[in-house]
Image (cartoon, coloured by chain):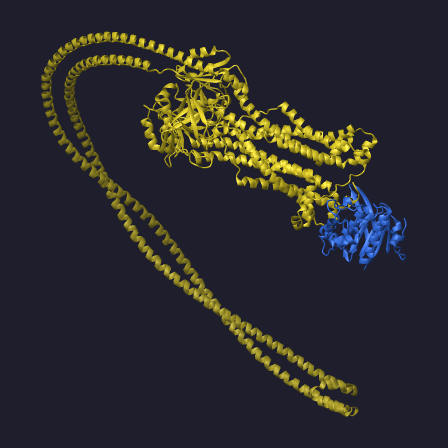
Amino acid sequence: MSFVEFKNVKKIYRTGEIEIQALSNVNFAIEKGEFCVIVGASGAGKTTILNILGGMDTLTSGSVLLDGREISHFNKKQLTAFRRYDVGFVFQFYNLVQNLTALENVELAAQICREPLDAETVLRQVGLGDRMMNFPAQLSGGEQQRVAIARALAKNPKLLLCDEPTGALDYNTGKAVLKLLQDTCRSSGMTVVVITHNSALAAMADRIITVKSGTVENMRINNNIVNVEDIEW
Amino acid sequence: MKTTAFREIKGTFGRFAAILSIIMLGVGFFSGTNLTTPAMLETIGGFLNEHQFYDYRLVSTVGWDDEDIMAIASEDEVRYVEGANSADVLFTDSKDFDSDDTYEFVIKLHSMPGMINGLEVLNGRLPKNPGECVADKSSGLKVGDKIYVSPDNEDGTKDMLKFTELRVVGLVYSSLYIHWERGSTSLGNGSVRGFAYVMSEDFDRDFYSDIYVRFDQDLDLYSDEYKDFMEERKDLWKLLADEQAEVRYERLLADGRKKIDDGKKELEQAREDGQKKLDDAKKQLDDAKEQLDDAKEQLDDAKKEINDNSGKLKDAKKELDDGEKQLDNAKKELDNAKSRITAGEATLDASKTQLDNAQTQLDVGKEQLDAAGTRLDSSKQQLDDAAKQLADGEQKLNEGEQKIADAEKQIADGEKQIKDGEAEIEKNEKLIADSEKKLDDAEQQYVAKVYESLNRVLWMLNDEQKKKLLDRASTKPEEVVSTIMDYLTAEQQLQLRQGKQQIDDGKKEIEESKKKLADGKKEVEENKKLIAEKKEELNAAKAEYQKGLDQYNEGLAQYQKAIEEYSAGLSKYSDGVTQYNNGKQEYDAGVKQYNEGKALYEEKKQQFDEGKQQYEDGKKALEDGKKQYREGKQQYEEGLKKYEDGLKEYEDGKKELEEKLADAEKEIADAEKKLADIDEPEGYLLDRSTNVGYACFENDSAIVQQVASVFPVFFVLVAALVCMTTMSRMVEEQRTQIGMFKALGYSEKSIMGKFMFYSGAAATIGCIIGYIAGTLTFPAIIWMTYKLMYLPLDIDYVFNPWLALLSLAASLICSVGMTWISCRHELEETAAQLMRPKAPKAGKRVLLERIPFIWKHMKFLHKVSVRNIFRYKRRLFMMIVGISGCTALLLTGFGINDSVKGFGDVQFDEILIADADMRYKPENGKLPSDLKEKFEKHTEGYALARAMSWNLIYGEDDREKEMDVYAPENYETMTDFFLFNTKEGKALPAPKKGEAIVSYSLQERYGVNVGDRIVLRDDKLREMRLTVTGVFNNYLYNYIFISPETLESKFGEKVEYNFAFLNFNEGENEEEASADITSCPSVQYFNLFSVVRTRMRDTMSSLNYVVLLIIICAAGLAFVVIYNLTNINITERLREIATIKVLGFFRRETSAYVLRENIALTAMGIVVGLGLGILLHSFVMAHIRVDMVTFKARILPMSYVYSIVLTFVFNFIVNIFMEIKLDRINMAESLKSVD
């Protein structure tokens, strides 16, 4: 059994009388320890998949299995617990708590987990050993994103979900962040799912899932993995 | 732009509502508190002005009359002047005065007013006829009730009233009684049930007790204008009252003198008249004497005549006696005759009885005879029947005999037939035996033939067959035959067949014979049976015959016996008839004898009656003669008595005349003395403040205004803060939009206009709703309590346009002004800057972090909260202001309650522990003896003092304030009734000569301190300078206590005590005791402290509603502030909250993360609020000025607890709402982009 499995997942948003089908019949699977990239144009449903996978949103029908547990049947509290113990998030806009220092932001996440990693160690790992006491406003975008990654990693999750992690970053910084993610995946064996509209990034993934108009257009195993440094876009 | 503004309001209604409601709350509270007192004054003032409440009431010791009224009416500015009478009267509810069920009560009776102090009729109508009245609405009397003047009233009261009962024709409110209290009285148990108004003609008085004056003014109640107006006229009118009293006195004296002169004249006249009458009487007496003499002469004549007649009467009596003797003789003869007649009568009666008996016996005998005859007839009939029956029986017997003979013959025939049958049977049997024998032979032949045939065929058969056939040939020849038949020749076969035929025929023959025999036997049996039956029948018939024979013989014997009896009866009957005929003959003879005897008796009786009548007539003539003689004698005696009566009457008349003259002379002397006794007159001028209702209402209505005037400041401050934070948040949220508008070329003005319109609209709507709600609800709620104490009129709402404008202006400054301030700052930035999102506010370390000891020991999440609290400074500030305001309001509200509720209890439980105080008029400088007796009866102790009124001179411009000054007879005794303790609880020593101790109110209000010298001045402008040696705790009234020596040395006169504090006996009914004491004429006033205490408590209970309003407003304030701020806090930090939710904070952790700050801020606000509340409370208490009352400003510990708990409860309720809101935050949505 795969680590992540989407089976006939459907998601319909209702606003008033209008129904919008965001996902229709999505099927895919990701193996444990894989670096997976979900690619697709804006509005294709990538983020919806990520939200469902991360327990931030519910699905209309179908089933989602993660590590053998069917999270599509979880209630609110179970979903919260699932987010708390099993998932790490990295967002496009970092979403750091402005009133907390870099270290405190990481600690905020770490202190609610079962087996957190040491906040300082993680920060050092992401290369922010000397900026730990700075508030987010005092950090550059790349540094903030690295704090966000550190915050996600410190929770020691089974699954790391990244939603356009480089969307707000410049080319080089973006590359550095992606490298960090790839390295993390390789070194810790953590399953990483990255969402991007940039299909060029697909080359670095073990598994590439292409999403189009709310359904999986293509899923393939990348046999020719390229290092981040070698990808140009 | 306007469209966006409206859409904005719709879209962010919560925010709009926040501004609206805080403005509404502020304006509502402001207008409500400011308009409550005016509305109350308007309500009561309107009533009093409408009914022309008096300005002055003039009272004099000599009363008033119409001339006084005319004189006062001629004064300037006087609108109305009216005389009025009033009296306290005991009434009962039933005519049955002695009944236990009859209830007695006191009514304050007034004469009907004209224009002044008008009445408002609620039910029924005003009195039109004497004997009708209108009554107090709150007295419990109803239209149509009748009340009766109690006989317990004093004579003076009874004389004053022209009626003995009153009919209630209407119920009214009176402007003289706007307060529920009806005053007290010296009558009954001292309490007054109510008032009533009667026609002034119903008062039998030639003077008025009061004159009421109304000036030509309609100024507002208690207004300064009115006070000034009255102050200007006070001196003039005081003088006027005195002068008019003097005038009235002079007139009264003149009238009195004239009356005495008239009286004297009348006396002279009376004396003359009396003398004349005496003379006339004497003359009449003389005439009478003459007449009497004449009468005596006549009497003597009559006596003589009587004596003459007496002789005649004697003769007549003798004649009568002779007659009587003759009559006696005649009677004797008659008696003899009568006894003879009686004997005859007896004989006659006896014989009559005998005759009657005989007749009865005869009747009975006849009846018996008749019955015997009837019986004999029926017996004969029976005998005939019996003879007939006997004949029938005989015939039946003969028939039976014949039947028996027939039957015997039949039997004999039958038996013979049987014998024949038996013979035939024997014959047949013999025949059968023969036939059988023949048959046996035939069979033997047949068998032999079979053997023969068999032998012929044996050779054709095998051995086995042979043997079988041979065995069977004897037993079953048929079988053998059938087997061998085929082997035989035709002849053989024929022989065999013939043999067989023979046997069969023989057999058949025997069968038939046997059958015949059986039939014969059967027939014989049947015949035998028949014979047996016949024999039986014959025996039965024989028995029956025997029985019939017996019956017949018996019947015959009976018949013969009956015939004998019948013959005996017949002879008896014949004897009876003979006897009866003899009796009848005898009876007829008796009747004849009786009738003869009776006729003889009748004759004799008539003779006797005639003799008796003669005797009666003689006797009656004798009685008449006697009666005539007696009447003559009586007439003579009556004549004698009449003469004596005449003599006595004459003596009485003479005596009476003399007495009457003496009385008249004494009356004149009394009148002269009374006139000389009339006191120097005194006129009193009383203004409105002497009316209990008017005076109380001034204080009561002012309380609300004084209490509430402080609070609106808070609301204005909070409203401004709420508007500012809300609007600046709004501007911040719409930053990009503002930039866009700016980029599109909209002017700053029009952009700002939108926000101003937004907040302005909210403020205006809030202001209008708040103003209306405040104007209507506050006065209505507070009036509800006042209604219980005053007339329950409907409240008149006051709309004050200036106040409305002021409120609107304040709301607009708070809203639009604050919007302008927050907008201006933003708009200064360029469009480009605005379009870019505002850089998030940088995180900052707080001061606390510099104290590692504390910081390190704090939980991580608590650290976050601490940093957040101090990060948003404006929120921190606003929250503290709002929450502290709420707590302070609550604390003040509860504190007011504590202070106000407490003072009465403290005053009468801990300071003034006497039960009552009173003032009396000393008798020869001492306590009047009757009063002393009552004291000893009802009280366990009393302390005397000299009570005076002195004016305290205070302040820089030497203002005067009237003070009650007491010089206690014995300071030590006084301390049993009044505890002179300092605020610290130390007892004060007695004031010595030239010293004074004063109540706390003097220190508080007039700045009198220990060691000061105070100046007191009385109305004769005498002055006293005293050193204050102590200030004692006291909450009600102003008191100054001095030593009597001070008075003595200052004025050189002996101090006359005129005042007392009392403590009743344990278990004494205070009201009854006070009524008893008040009944002493020397008592000037009497004050029961329990009544004062109740009145105080009632007044102060109106504050409860004020406190309730304060609590409601505090709650409103807390809700608006906390809700608004938390709301802003959440929207501002939406991303942060979404982030922590994504991180996996549970619901409770998330709300704790946010609301922990709220709780911390609330706690901080409460701490500040408690401090503020204490200040506010003391400020408010200092401003509540109820005349004569000093409140004991205090806040009980429980009030602190309530305030804190309530604030937290408000916070908690808001937090629940917020938790729901937090739960609804959509993470995915909130994190999507930068807003």
- Quarter of the image for residue B427 reads bottom right
In this rendering, does residue B608 appear at all?
yes
- Residue B963, position as x, y percentages in the image: 44, 25
State the image quarter where residue B391 is shown.
Answer: bottom left
* B1167 horizontally vs B474: left or right: left
Q: Which chain is assigned blue?
A: A
Write down the colour of chain B.
yellow
The residue nearer to you, when weighing B327 against B640, is: B640
Residue positioned 75% across, 32% down in the render: B825
Q: Quadrant of the C terminus of chain B?
A: top right
Rendered residue at 41%/60% (across/down): B394
Please provide percent x and percent y for residue B136: 47, 25
Q: Residue B915, image x and y in percent?
A: 40, 33
Residue in front for this viewpoint, A176 or B709: A176
Q: Quadrant of the N terminus of chain B?
A: top right
Identify which residue, B979 or B767, lies in the foreground: B979
Q: x and y percent of residue A67 in the render?
A: 78, 57
Q: Is residue B403 above or below residue B620?
A: below
